[in-house]
Image (cartoon, rainbow, N blue to C red):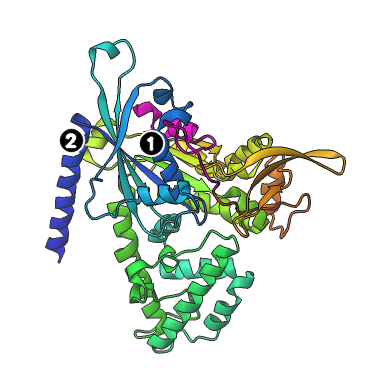
Amino acid sequence: MVLTSLADSAARRVEALGSSLSETFLEPSLRLGVTGLARAGKTVFITSLVANLMNRGRMVQLSAARDGRIETAYLQPQPDDTVPRFDYESHLAALTGADPHWPDSTRAVSELRLSLKVRPSGLLAGLQGPRVLHLDIVDYPGEWLLDLALLDKSYDQWSGEVLARIAGREEAQGFLAAAGATDAHAAHDEGQAQALAASFTEYLNAARNAGFYDCTPGRFLLPGDLAGSPVLTFAPLAAGEGSAPRGSLRREMARRYEAYKTRVVKPFFRDHFSRIDRQVVLVDALGAIHSGPPAVEDLRQSMADILGAFRPGRNRFLTRILGGKRVEKILFAATKADHLHHVQHPQLTAIIEALTREAQDRARFAGAETAALSLASLRTTTEEMRAHQGQELPCVRGTLLEGGRQAAFYPGALPEDPGKLLTPARQGAERWLEGDYQSMAFAPAPLSLRPGDGLPHIRLDRAAEFLIGDRL
């Protein structure tokens, strides 16, 4: 088994070396990772990005598109034969059809290759022909990304942290009662193990629905073909006194936790995550603000944990050839900016900057370039001012997801100083003392696109300029 493992590892390195040499000296490729936690809009982001790179009329902030240097963009088969293709055509049809609706959310890793033929710029532009850049977009759930932090934790550490963190949460009381009534040192019983894992999974789903983000292990929420397997049949248990004996429930839970790291988390890191060049992390900051201070603090900590999973730094020439890629650029994007009037976009951008400050500082220290902005991958609303109690309120109007009727919406005034949200969140406040922040779910609006125009958006072109502009 050791020889087989060594041979597999050597084969992967040779394959990676050949791929790196090909990319470096022939047609270069750039792997863009797209992730975000639940309801952040990953699928819509990728669909709109590809649509707007293929029809670039709305990409005025992407310099290569504005200058007309992108001659064409076309989809090709992705290079990874074992990774499902991102279903771009179906998702685009869902957003642009006669009855537009949101496409299904990300539930597993998928990939899409968009090849761009670009004319060079500069003094030698007239002496060189167009070149090709392959943009490989890798879509994966943010919940899986948080799992990477488990690699450095033992079962005892993970259990202690989880039980302490969820002790006061209403959603966790059912699981905590079941875990508290369990004798972890008793002989392992599979029925009991399955019941505890099911109760813990029920808590994770309830916590995610309540706006919490620290919902690991991520595969409990998105099990796929692992559903019901022993590798997903464990739960955190208090350590108790003394070490757990062989054959005990706790010892078996610890074994399955280690198997989860070895069989699920490490392959994801090795096969997908460690090969990413650029990364965008999508954040539903408005949803967290609506959920209250605990959700905002949980989001801030999750952003720091997410950055801890990256290997930020510059991809120098020899590094790319010899393997060991590092993430060169990381963009943190607050989505659903179309749920606010544009006069509040600076406040939303300031909030995402503050939420990710710790994560960005760590990345910059390691040599990576970071940015934060607010965007809407697909604009679903129009703006208007409405009189209310003697003042004009900046509102947005759109079609409500539930009921399908048109409505004008004012979410509340975001503070100019992000500290007015982050400070009470850090201090453990349960609700906002100043202001009442609402959120609304809008359906995609029917579209009538002119030739050459992609999907309507807010600042998607600025995001593209940061992520790939230097390679165009």
Question: Which kind of residue does numbered mark 1 sit on?
Answer: Glu
Quadrant in the rendering for residue 126: top left
344 sits to left or right of 33 = right
Magenta segment includes 456:
yes
Residue 256 spot, x, y in % from top left:
35, 74
Magenta segment includes 442:
no
Quadrant in the rendering for residue 50: top left
Quadrant in the rendering for residue 122: top left
Upstream in sequence: badge 1 or badge 2 = 2
Alpha carbons under labels 1 and 2: distance apart:
19 Å
Location of residue 3 with respect to 275 vertically, above or below: below
Residue that badge 1 annotates = 328
Task: For mark 2, give the secondary structure.
Answer: helix
Residue 191 spot, x, y in % from top left:
41, 87
Q: Over which residues does the magenta segment extend?
A: 445-472
Q: Residue at x 31, y 29 (%)?
A: 72
Q: Residue at x 46, y 66 (%)?
A: 158
Image quarter in which the C terminus is found? top left
